[in-house]
Image (spheres, helix red, strand yellow):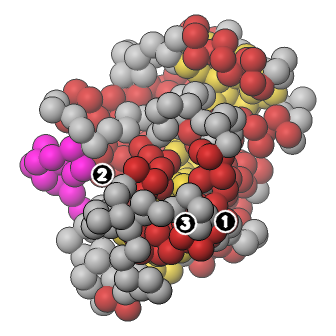
Amino acid sequence: MTSVYVSGASGFIAQRIIKQLLEKKYKVVGSVRSTEKGDGLVKNFGPDFQYEIVGDIAAKGAFDESLKKHPEVTIFLHTASPFTFTSDDVENDLLIPAQKGTVNALEGIEKYAPQIKKVVITSSYVAIWDITKEFSDPSHLVNEESWNPVTPTEAKSNALMAYCASKTYAERAAWDFVKKNNPNFTLSTVNPSYVFGPQAFEVKDTLNLSSELVQNFLKLKSTDPLPELSGAFVDVRDVAAAHLVAFEKDEAANQRLVLVAHQFIAQEIADIIHKKFPDKSKNVPIGTPGQTAPVDSWSKKDFSKTEKLLGFEYIGLDQSVVDAIDQIFSK
């Protein structure tokens, strides 16, 4: 039975990945920051999941000991990365941990886990977009070869730019590592856009940031304006499935899988909530029903290479939002 290491195992995406891995009869080793988190995952996932404590992914040799303990692992999925838009110290909260955590994982694999042949890193759509053109330049083409041009100065301007830079620089560091060291393993990245959809298990009081964007619609007053929320989306279940494709299909080796199921604006989410939950959406602003994303004025996107590799149809925005909100109402 093949064993897979999943860093950041308690995360929203990671838990979905682990659930799908276990359903396909893989064994899983997950890294978490505390015994409490690890024990909670064991309770949910059962005996084919075990965990290791990695307190600080940015610490030198962070993954070394856990890799030494698991010579059975042949696949490594690196999902661990800081994620916040509210930091006062973006360098230490985002930029340094993202890059160091990624390089620490790759260095540990190269030194102590030569049996690992495939590495998949959870990157992000923000590592490929150009925020200055994304919503205003239809002549700008974005595809799997694109990179975010964010500069170090821009990265420190605010937490959003820092997050975009952290994902960009961490992914670049990974590809640079492979180019420089020519390791035993292949590298693939999964670059999802906004990730919506239901949690792998019950809804907690605090959701991940992407899920909170949907839940926040339910906290509005009918007189409030709709949130300034727009962009590209993909469902968390498809993100998880893409991670499996990234190591199961040989042709996905050394590729970037960029996941965009649909481009949306907040109005579309509001419309779905009103249509599907009429009795529970009275406080959700109505806005301008029927309005959709003005994609003709946004950057052009071509991720046909990814879609061909994936070989499955994406879950739509309707189903993703409905499943997420159903879960919130059922808690």
Q: Circle 3 sits in a helix, a strand or a loop, which is it?
A: helix
Span of residues in magenta? 149-162
Residue located beneath label 2 in the image: 164
Task: Tell me the amino acid under the disc marked 1.
Answer: Gln
Q: Is residue 21 left or right of residue 162?
A: right
Residue located beneath label 1 in the image: 319
Disc count in the image? Answer: 3
Task: Tell me the amino acid under the disc marked 3.
Answer: Ile
Q: In which quarter of the image is the N terminus?
A: top right
Task: Give me the C-alpha separation between circle 2 and circle 3.
Answer: 29 Å
* Quadrant of the image occupied by residue 6: top right
* Residues under numbered marks 1 and 3 in contact, where contact means CB atoms less than 8 Å apart: no
Say if residue 300 shows up in the picture. no
Identity of the residue drawn at 72% across and 49% down = 244
Q: 59 or 233, which is in the foreground?
A: 233
How far across and down, in percent of the image, does residue 31 sit? 58, 21
Identity of the residue drawn at 22% across and 27% down = 92
Q: 11 or 230, which is in the foreground?
A: 230
First of labels 2, 3 by sequence position: 2
